[in-house]
Image (spheres, rainbow, N blue to C red):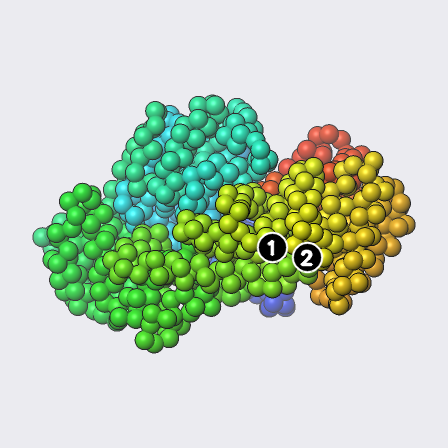
Amino acid sequence: MSELPAGTVTFLFSDIEGSTRLAQEVGDAFPGLIVEHQTIVRSEIGARGGIELGTEGDSFFVVFPSALSAVSAALDVQRRLQAETDFKVRMGLHSGEAAVRGGSYYGLEVHRAARIAAAGHGGQVLISNATMALVSQQLPEGTIATDLGEHMLKDLASPEHLYQLTATGLPAEFPVLRTLEPEHHNIPPAPTPLVGRRGQLGELAELVGAKKLITLTGPGGVGKTRLALQLGLESQAKFVDGVWLVQLATIADPKHVVHEIAIALNVQVTSSADVVATVAESLGPKELLLILDNFEQVIDAAPDIATLLTKARGLHMIVTSRERLNVIGEQQWEVPPLTTPEPAAEISADDLDGYEATLLFLQQARAVKPSFRPTDDDARFIADVCNRLDGIPLAIELAASRLRMMTPAALSSRIDDRLAILTGGSRNLPDRQQTLRAAIDWSYQLLELDERTMLADLSVFRGGRSLEAIEAVCGPDLDGSALDAVASLVDKSLVREESSPGGESRFVMMESIHDFATERLDESGRTTELRQRHAEYFTTLATQGITLGATRHVNTEHINTLNLEVENLRHSLRWLFDSGQDEAGARVVSGVAEAWGFESHLQDVAEWARRALVNENDLTDATRALLYDRLGLATFLQSDLIAARSWWQKAHDLYAQIGDHDGVSYSLINIAASYLGDMDGYEVAIDMLERGLGGLRASSDGFDDTQPLIVRGELHRVAGDFDAARSAYEEGLAKARTAGAQRRQIVLLVNLGTLAQHRNDPGHALELISESIVIARASGSAAWTATGIRYAAPPITDLGYPEDGARLLGAAQRWEQRLNVIHQPNDVEVVERGRQTVAAGLSADDLERLMAEGAQMTLDEAVDLATRDRATREV
């Protein structure tokens, strides 16, 4: 081996991504491929003066006396690997001084280089800030260094500032780095790299931490959200308790803002609590950063934000809004447009990468037309388009999407004409607001009549739209088909198609486009007609087959739909009550109550039911009785059994008054359930239950009595008669299976599982509870999935897997808080006993550590851990 260089050196680590999978795929050919890989790497590092220090399998450890030589060698290796092989090799470089011992280097700088490499992906070259400082003024020709910000690396106490090197012919887009940040934020991966903004990010980085509240303002489409998310990612090292995004785009009521913050931070809030005080107390001295996105529509929540910031001394916020919050201590920061060439500048195709706006245009153009390669003539027209759109990202993306059908020259011509017409916008709007409006209006003017009508009509929805809803609400206004009109809007980037959890298509609009479409609808004079049609559609949806929810079997698909359409249903309820249609509004509340209650939208049910009762004398007696029943259900699920009994008693009395015998019977069963927290009333409860059940069986053919059987089982269980409880549960489960009542099956399987655990049969308990988890997840019930995970933890612990049990307990606790799951008083003892079972075999420190690990799991990861074959689980 050559004499090792001393002083400041540069280390390079590399390995093949997915080498184990590749070895399995190619079998006996793998050793020959590794030799080919090693030959290429050794050739290029040797040519640049590198010294190979170690080779283990598919990895290399190399030292270079020069940082520039190391960077050049890394890029040369990547070029040859891409041209000659299918290998995807990740590389990490770091410069520093390290001790030499036994013919190699040791110390923190070596570990740092190895961790940098481990953070990357196949084909990616990452370098440290130290290496960047040495090569920044002499990068090889055609090389681009992208600043990725600071990242926490495994086993290193302080964050490392990383850069990504790319060069002509090499890939430039990779997934998020494999660093520790996912444990400390909930920011989703960006679909495309951030274009430009490095100067603004540097300026804002100095404000983050120094200012409690930074408000990024600017017109819709200027890039406030994208900038805020990148700023949050790059600020993680300043906040030991993480960076958390709260998306407010679908929240219309300012009172719900702090509730959304509580959900994001896993803070449990009861219906009667002071939400601001509860969240502030929960945060205490925690050092964390909140990003509140799209605040303009809930601007009246600004005082609550100010109070939170005052009471939680470690809390900092970045807010995106079209207007400032106007509270003390706020630092407003106007988000500028992207940089553009000077209007009269001579520009070639090679110059387009040098400006943020034109670079974004190219990125979007290639997304819709991968073969697009601009000529020098094209470059002039592209620069003109970006200048005419004032560098607004949304406007540029909309314009670039037209390259499917138009040349840059034709695009420039159309943009010119359109902006000339729209220069006389309202004087009370900012210039950039007019510019964005012009860009969207330009796309709007290119639409056919049906497409324009559809775009305007779609604005009546909130939180997404199904094709069925679009056809019903918007279809009557069209000459052609609703499907064709929507498909065309998707193609033209004005509407985005997404998949619902059930796999059906849903159609969403960017907020700025939604606002523009709302204006077009208002101008048409059809807003009232569309709001009414929208409300009628969702009234029909909510009230399909409406009966008393506590005893009917509700179709799983229908429940999922009602939960998916929460925002549209809320929007409909506001219209119905604001326009004096209280009877219809009351029936919508009644129709959604069980579905929303099952998924913990309890506050919604209670609030809307009380709103419906404001003018209760105007309601029919039948509707009023149904509302009393729903309020009983909501308060029961919120664990207020006394209030639930009162509401159900009122329902009972009104049903008796109007001669609804089934209603009386249902109410007796419900009142019986309200005694689950009061065993002094056990005999009364059993009597009421049997009277109600007998009445229904006598009067109703094919009556689904699984819910009364659940109540019977619970009453017996709480009273200590476990055999009777088991008998009731098993009878109910058999009937629920026959009826295909998945929600009932979930509850009964969990109940039978807890009884099996109670009689020391953890194997059978886990079998039952695992089945409940599988059904809950498949049916779309996140709340009951989390509950099942909690109940799976004790039997898994008793079967010899205490660490898995603790992880599951941590996962369940996190997801139940996030989903606002409330345990009934009759379940509290079981929950506590389960926690004690999990904790018994672990030290306090181990329990805390393992639960913290579980709290980082996705719901699907926790499901996998709870339901996997125990034989494959590591002990």
Query: In front here: 76 or 622?
Result: 622
Query: In front here: 805 or 341?
Result: 805
- Horizontal side, residue 854 vs residue 189: left or right: right
Q: Is residue 97 above or below residue 765?
A: above
Give the percent coordinates (x, y) of residue 559: 60, 58
Q: Is residue 643 visible?
A: yes
Give the percent coordinates (x, y) of residue 343: 12, 52
Q: Quadrant of residue 19?
A: bottom right
Say which residue appears at 30% left-offset and 41% top-offset. Answer: 322
Label 1, label 2: how many angstroms apart (C-alpha)? Answer: 9 Å
Q: Is residue 808 visible?
A: no
Label 1 sits on a secondary structure element that is helix
Say which residue appears at 31% left-offset and 35% top-offset. Answer: 324
Q: Is residue 330 above or below residue 722?
A: above
Q: Residue furthest left?
A: 344
Q: Residues within 10 Å of mark 1 (few under 14, many from 20)?
A: some
Residues at circles 1 and 2 in contact by the CB criterion of under 8 Å:
yes
* Amino acid, disc 1: Ala
* Amino acid, disc 2: Asp
Say which residue appears at 46% left-offset and 38% top-offset. Answer: 255
Give the percent coordinates (x, y) of residue 326: 32, 30
Residue at mark 1: 622
Give the percent coordinates (x, y) of residue 186: 50, 43
Residue at mark 2: 660
Q: Residues within 10 Å of mark 2 (few under 14, many from 20)?
A: few
